[in-house]
Image (cartoon, grey):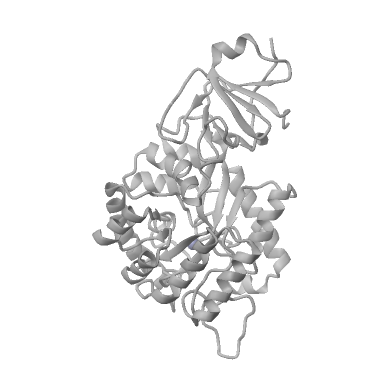
Amino acid sequence: MNGNNLKILIDGIIIDGKGSGPIKDQAIIIEGKKIKDIVKVDSILKNIKPAYTLYDLKGQYIMPGFIDTHTHVQMSVAQTEIQKFRENIPKKTLRAAFHAKNTFEAGFTSIRDLGAEYLIDLDLRDAINEGLLVGPRMFVSGYKIMPTGADFPMYAPEVKIEGQHVMDSPEAIKREVRTLLARGVDVVKVMTSGRTARATSSPDAYALSLEDTKIVVQEAHNQNKKVSAHAHGAKGIKIALQAGCDSLEHGTILDDQDIEIMLKNNVFLVPTLSYGRRIEQLGGKCDLPKYAIEKALRSRENRLKSFSKALKSGVKIALGSDSGMPFVNHGDNAFEAMSMVEAGMTVMQAIQSMTSCAAELIGISDKIGDITPGKLADIVIVDKNPLQDISVLNNKDNIKAVIKEGKIEIDRGLRFKEKA
Ligand SMILES: [Zn+2]
């Protein structure tokens, strides 16, 4: 049941995404794709026009659609390297669509997907926008900008694998960024450090150099697109910040000087705590190579220190689950909010990081991220109080409805009320 395009939500408790709430006794009027108005319930009940459908939320919580600023819907949590290489592109695309749907069903109406192979992310974004599939609004980066050795595993010298984009010269980097922008990416993802999850890549070493990263930033900013930097170690972080990147993904080792630059230049931190937290929870019982477990746990220790430093100093922190990494399931994106609260955020701060703050990082605060008249009606209805326990958001059973642009896409028992 989608209802018509004129809706009124009454008797819900609003948590608006901007830090206010819970707000009671309001009616949210939705016309077409947008929130038309928010008014006192008493005033609207007296003169509802017959064209409107009335939804009585009976004390359930009304939140803005959730936003995850760091996903990998193409990546499968459980697939081995060899399974990935055996799978053809159509199957990979269907898999990505399935993951995007799982994410959406958990209340995430928008995601920023950072780094996909074969540009699957661009077509998936467009297919969802065309209405071919139900899924989150996607903001995508296409290929990551990275040099040899930063990410892909090394195989025997005679093995050549298509689709793995690496670039090692300024010319190649410039061409790659310009090509991605021309193809229509929403954001550029650059790797300024190596990875924790690869045997042959060091998170402490820089990946792209400062000079090369500056090229990326210049080309992206020239077309008003932001640059998101995968940066773990001190070297990679400093390169990302000096080059002018707009967000640090992971940000594992931050010093005071980094924090100062982040505050001055409005650089967001996307701490991606879920992976390390999950490995920690699983302890020794986790099916990963020993080096990966050790690197993840060491990284977690450092990242928690950097996270609290950033939090205390007022650096903007946006939720990014890094879903697709081992044990970080698509659809469990709100586990990241739980991890951030465990690490010191208030519940309200965590909610802002997955709504208004995330929208600000993506650059779409004028359209989504909070519940305000004039914005798109991306709304999630939750039947338990997340302010008491943030973990209620990471259970689909509690997510009673997902509304995207005024349309009820997921309905797990939204109560419809006949007009008196
Ligand atoms: Zn990632």
Q: Quadrant of residue 301?
A: bottom left
- In depth, the one of 171 and 346 nearer the eye is 171
Q: Is residue 334 visible?
A: no
State the quadrant of the C terminus. Answer: top right
**Which residue is pictured at 53% across the width and 58% down the height?**
224
Taking 342 as reference, is 370 left or right?
Answer: right
Q: List x then y, in percent, for residue 352.
A: 43, 40
Q: Residue furthest front?
A: 222
**Which residue is pictured at 42% across the width and 62% down the height?**
245
Vertical comparison of 335 with 262: above or below: above
Q: List x then y, in percent, for residue 23.
A: 45, 23
Q: Quadrant of residue 48?
A: top right
Q: Residue furthest left?
A: 256
**Which residue is pictured at 34% across the width and 72% down the height?**
204
State the quadrant of the N terminus. Answer: top right
Q: List x then y, in percent, for residue 41.
A: 55, 15
Taking 372 as reference, is 316 left or right?
Answer: left
Q: Is residue 356 visible?
A: yes
- In depth, the one of 68 and 33 nearer the eye is 33
Exactly how many numbered labels are in the figure? Answer: 0
**Which residue is pictured at 39% across the width and 36% down the height?**
348
Q: Quadrant of residue 20?
A: top left
- In depth, the one of 156 and 416 nearer the eye is 416
Q: List x then y, in percent, for residue 291.
A: 40, 73
Vertical comparison of 105 with 326: above or below: above
